[in-house]
Amino acid sequence: MKKIVVSTGAGISAESGLSTFRDSGGLWDKYPVMDVASLDGFMRNPALVHEFYNQRRREALKCQPNAGHLGLKELEQWFDVRVITQNVDNLHEKAGSTHVLHLHGELMKIRSMKREDRVYTLTPDNLETSVDTRDEYGDPVRPHIVFFQEAVPNFEKAVEWVREADIFVVIGTSLNVYPAASLLMYVRPGTPIYYIDPNPAKIPMGAENVTIIKKKAGEGVPELVELLRSQL
Ligand code: APR
């Protein structure tokens, strides 16, 4: 089976009702990013950061996958599909995608501040954390999110996936944040790249064979599914 590797950003979840970050009215218009999504910010005011992620969990709970997420699941009938996402929501998992790799963490997970290997999954009836939350060992916890100024532990694995791709797809990301934005530079020469975004960012220098589908994910992904199926 041919391998399709997909790199998604906040844009694929926009039609499910989740705010993007840098579109007008996005999250970074409402919150100073370095206060709520950086390690400095968390150390300075952990209560604010806990509440920011509590609020995003409450919003995410109400959301369902859209035709963009579902189209990637549909592709699994004919391709080996690997999804690398910058998103912390679990809409790819809800859509049924089999291989999902989160680069920036997972909203519904928290972890011990003493042992980063102790990761806990929150449930819909137990979504909120605070500076007083303790895990089973009595240790304080933090969102299982990669803050700005922190390493991206899954990046090496993501690069391995991209290197094996026969087709690479980028959906709904402004290609602003590294190292995620650099993934398309790791495709093997000659690998076709498709970029689905209604307001596509400038393609980084050196990227070749890029086809831009200037559409929202909900329309662009089903269109790409049909195109790839017709080429089988
Ligand atoms: N369908 C597809 N793409 C869309 C849609 C849509 N319906 N609506 C908006 N977009 C596109 C925008 O045009 C933009 O290119 O989604 C992209 C959103 O860009 P950002 O808001 O910058 O989100 P993202 O690229 O995922 O941000 C990367 O930044 O703040 C950090 O950790 C955070 O993972 C996030 C990272």
Image (spheres, helix red, strand yellow):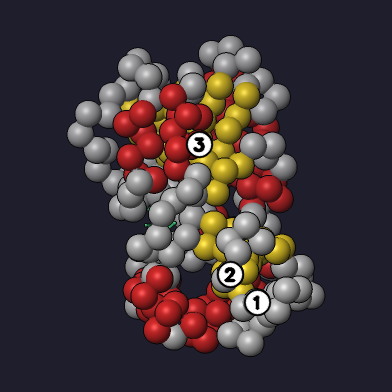
Q: Secondary structure at mark 1?
A: loop
Q: Residue at x 29, y 46 (%)?
A: 201
Q: Quadrant of ligand 1?
A: bottom left
Q: Secondary structure at mark 2?
A: loop
For the C terminus, give its image quadrant: top right
Instruction: Please tell me whether residue 48 is drawn above or below residue 232 in the rendered image.
Output: below
**Residue at the outermost right position:** 125
The CA span between labels 3 and 1 is: 29 Å
In front of the other: label 3 or label 2? 2
In this view, 193 is above or below 47: above
Q: Earlier in the sequence, mark 3 or mark 1?
A: 1
Tag on residue 114? Answer: 2
Find residue 27 and report its image quarter: bottom left
User: Quick check: 156 left or right of 232?
Assistant: left
**Mark 2 crowdedness (10 Å alpha carbons): few <14, some 14-19, many ≥20:** few
Which image quarter: residue 137? bottom right
List x then y, in percent, for residue 209: 32, 22
Q: Does residue 107 appear to the left or right of 208 in the view shown?
A: right
**Mark 1 Cβ inside 8 Å of ligand 1:** no
State if disc 2 and disc 1 touch (CB < 8 Å).
yes
Kindly identify which residue carries mark 1: 139
* Disc with the residue nearer the chain's start (3 vs 2): 2
Q: Nearer the viewer, residue 217 or 189?
A: 189
**How far apart in space, not on screen, are marks 3 and 2 (Cα)?**
25 Å
Which x, y percent locates residue 57?
A: 63, 71
Tell which of 209 and 124 is nearer to you.
124
CB atoms at circles 3 and 2 under 8 Å apart? no
The residues bearing labels 1 and 2 have C-alpha atoms spaced at a distance of: 7 Å
Which numbered circle lies on residue 157?
A: 3
